Amino acid sequence: MRAACLSIVLAFTSCGGEPEPSRPATGTPSPETPPESATDPAPPTTDVPSVPSDPPIVSFVATASHTGVALSLSNHGTSDVMVRTAVAVEIGHDEAFTPAPSSSTLSLRYDCTHEAERCVTLTPGAELLPPDWRGTWGDMQCDCTRCAPVEPGRYRLVVTTCDGTHRLESNAFDLPSTD
């Protein structure tokens, strides 16, 4: 009990006594502080700013041809950009785009022999050229054992940064009928 009382003595004037009077915060005028100290700058804060980060300088280009859609993702900024490899397909309706109603997977993977990681890092100046999208649902890249052609129309592709703060859209492109 005596040890507990001694450790509390630093915060109280005596064991079982009243706490020390509170002291004014730095920069707050008090009767003992001259008024010019009220203009002292506030101490630095370690809080993370709530301002969103600047969007990455990345181009996401989709080039449609009669055999599919070539994809290119390039980092034109001065810092690394981490992007989720899952690519969403959106279908154009008039001036708006809506997510495609499909559970098919299109990804930013390096080749057809390796599965995509969750995220990929693009260093400044790097370009990623994943396998083409075949313009199909089901197996969207590489092997097309269970696939069906998408409807002709206007499309765009979308990825997000790994932290989810930025959305990167490709250019809009048209896929013609496969007839």
Image: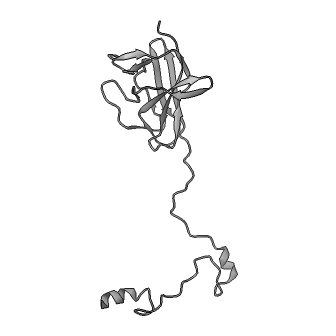
Q: Is residue 84 above or below residue 143?
A: below
Give the residue displayed 60% in from the left and 70% down from the top: 42
Q: How many marks?
A: 0
Where residue 117 sits in the image (x, y, percent)? Answer: 35, 35
User: Is 154 on the left-hand or right-hand side of 14?
Assistant: right
Depth order, front residue of 156/152: 152
Q: Image quadrant for the N terminus?
A: bottom left
Give the residue displayed 47% in from the left and 11% down from the top: 66
Depth order, front residue of 62/91: 91
Where residue 39 sits in the image (x, y, percent)? Answer: 67, 74
Q: Is residue 76 above or below residue 31?
A: above
Q: Is residue 5 above or below residue 123?
A: below
Q: Say which quarter of the image contains residue 94.
A: top right
Give the residue displayed 51% in from the left and 29% down from the top: 60
Where residue 20 sits in the image (x, y, percent)? Answer: 50, 88
From this viewpoint, which residue is outermost toward the right?
35
From this viewpoint, which residue is outermost toward the front?
101
Query: How is the model colour-coded?
Result: one colour
Where residue 156 sits in the image (x, y, percent)? Answer: 52, 25
Depth order, front residue of 12/46: 12
